[in-house]
Image (spheres, helix red, strand yellow):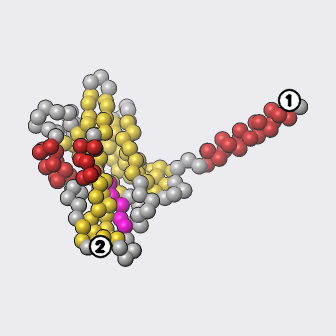
Amino acid sequence: MKKYFTIILFVISSLIYSQNLFARDQCNIDQQVKLNIFKKNDYKFYNYICESSEGSYLKGYFGDQEKKIFVGDYSDFAAKESPKLLAVSIYKSTKRKPPILITINSAYYCCTPQIEGEMYQVNLYQISENKILKLKNITNILGSNAEGFEGIAEGKVYYKYKTISEIKKWLDKNY
């Protein structure tokens, strides 16, 4: 009896493991962006595009050859097209504050009578490097400006912070 119980338990656990094995999302490197933070080309931003059963999404990593830190992911499964990484940059304050990693993602909406345009998401990460590299998500300082839509939605709608230069201007005044 113990033998049959052990065999059944082994078969069930094998089935569960094999389902998880095949359910993994497939990710491929999309972009590598060289960044100048503390010295020239000292870090990179790695953007992966991943496919899941729900659709495609982005995963971002930050680091160097030795260590990569998961930054975050971006998905918008309601959008018509796959999400895109539009820009990555570093903001260096003149007020002796830590540098900030800026990322801008977007997804395109179309084909409905009410909405057509781009949905934008801005993320800000404070970078510190004592003995180890650390990122702190500080996107909340943007408030409701962290996301926005530009296009047609019951009239023409504009989003101000869709470029790195606009975000850096905002940071100059508010950071």
Residue type, mark 2 in image: Glu
Which residue is the site of mark 1? 2
Tag shown at residue 144: none
Q: Position of residue 143 (x, y in %)?
A: 25, 48
SS of the residue under disc 1: helix
Q: Which of the two labelled residues, at mark 1 and mark 2, occupies the earlier sequence position?
A: 1
Q: Is residue 117 left or right of residue 7?
A: left
The residue that label 2 is drawn on is 154
Q: Position of residue 128 (x, y in %)?
A: 26, 30
Q: CA distance from mark 1 to mark 2?
A: 68 Å
Stretch in magenta:
102-109
Q: Is residue 107 visible?
A: yes
Going 33% across and 47% down the picture, which residue do you hit? 32
**Disc 2 residue crowd, few under 14, some 14–19, many 20+, Cα 10 Å:** few
Return the residue nearer the eye: 115 or 14.
115
Coordinates of residue 107 in the picture (x, y in percent): 36, 61
Q: Amino acid at mark 1?
A: Lys
Q: Is residue 7 above or below residue 123?
A: above
Q: Please, what is the dominant secondary structure of the magenta stretch?
A: strand
Q: Residue at x 65, y 47 (%)?
A: 19
Going 15% across and 43% down the picture, which residue do you hit? 174
